[in-house]
Amino acid sequence: MSTGSDEYEDSDSISQTRSRYQRSYRQKPTMMSTTSTLSSRIGQINRSLQDTNRNINAVDGLLDDYKDVNGNNQKLSIGDNLAKSTEQLREERKKKRSSFREGDSRTLHASDLEAGGGDVGQRYNPTSPLREYRVSGGASTRHHHQTPGVRFDETSEEVHELHQAVRDLSSDQLRLGTELNQEIQNRNRLEFDTNRKYHDLNESISRTPSKSTNESSQVSLTDNGVC
């Protein structure tokens, strides 16, 4: 009877040891699958970060190109507007000078100033711009008067509008430059935050397999101690 009980106890201990080894072998593939899943996720995150960096660099290049093109276009537009305005001012001055010359080109003769000269009832004044003669009863009276000054109201208004347009273009250019700089700073900040998160994730993942290895070694040592 004692021999049978000993054999029964030996078989029971063998079955327990076998079941423990089976559990330990089942746990190892699970840990390996977890590690492979983490590695695949790390690879996906790394690829997505690389794509994000490429996109950010491409956008920065486009922003720089847009800034250069916009600055060149604004310079050309300002130059064209200045050239057109200068040409208009020159044309207006030529027209005004020609109109003044046409008004002064007609000369008067002494016979035109006489009472009976020319058409009946027609009186002519001398050509002096600083004097005004009035004929009353055969005697001429002289009155001094001031010549009206030439006014360039329209020209000054156009010059003012031109200066205002140049100031508006300059302010728009400064505003666009400020917005572009802010956008570049935001993208650089986003890239820095992404790299930092990626570094933290790598550190956490590098610590996770070491913990899993320690736990598996502890399980193996426990099983060996029990056996």
Image (cartoon, rainbow, N blue to C red):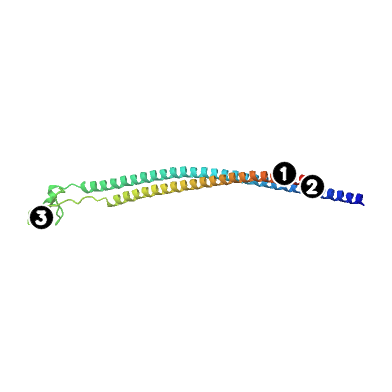
**What residue sits 34% from the left and 48% below the top?**
163
Q: Bin the neighbour count of mark 2 within 10 Å (Cα to Cα): few under 14, some 14-19, many 20 and up.
A: some
Instruction: Point out the tag, 2 or 1, that comes first from the N-terminus.
Output: 2
Q: Residue 124, percent across and down?
A: 15, 52
Q: Which residue is mark 3?
A: 135
Q: Give the left or right position of residue 79, taking residue 151 as reference.
A: right
Q: Secondary structure at mark 2?
A: helix
Amino acid bearing label 3:
Val
- Measure the alpha-carbon separation of dots 3 and 2: 141 Å
Amino acid bearing label 2:
Tyr
Q: Bin the neighbour count of mark 1 within 10 Å (Cα to Cα): few under 14, some 14-19, many 20 and up.
A: few
Residue 202, disc: none
- Measure the alpha-carbon separation of dots 2 and 1: 13 Å
Q: Residue 156, percent across and down?
A: 29, 50
For the residues bearing labels 1 and 3, Cβ distance under 8 angstroms = no
Q: Secondary structure at mark 1?
A: helix
Q: Which residue is mark 1?
A: 217
Q: Nearer the viewer, mark 1 or mark 3?
A: 1
**What residue sits 72% from the left and 44% below the top?**
217
Q: Nearer the viewer, mark 3 or mark 2?
A: 2
Front residue of this view, candidates 25 and 103? 25
Q: Give the left or right position of residue 111, taking residue 20 as reference.
A: left
Amino acid bearing label 1:
Ser
Instruction: Point out the tag, 1 or 3, that comes first from the N-terminus.
Output: 3
Front residue of this view, candidates 94 and 215? 215
Front residue of this view, candidates 209 and 114? 209
**What residue sits 32% from the left and 50% below the top?**
160
- Measure the alpha-carbon separation of dots 1 and 3: 132 Å
**What residue sits 72% from the left and 47% below the top?**
31
Q: Residue furthest right?
A: 1
Q: Which residue is mark 2?
A: 21
Instruction: Point out the tag, 3 or 2, that comes first from the N-terminus.
Output: 2
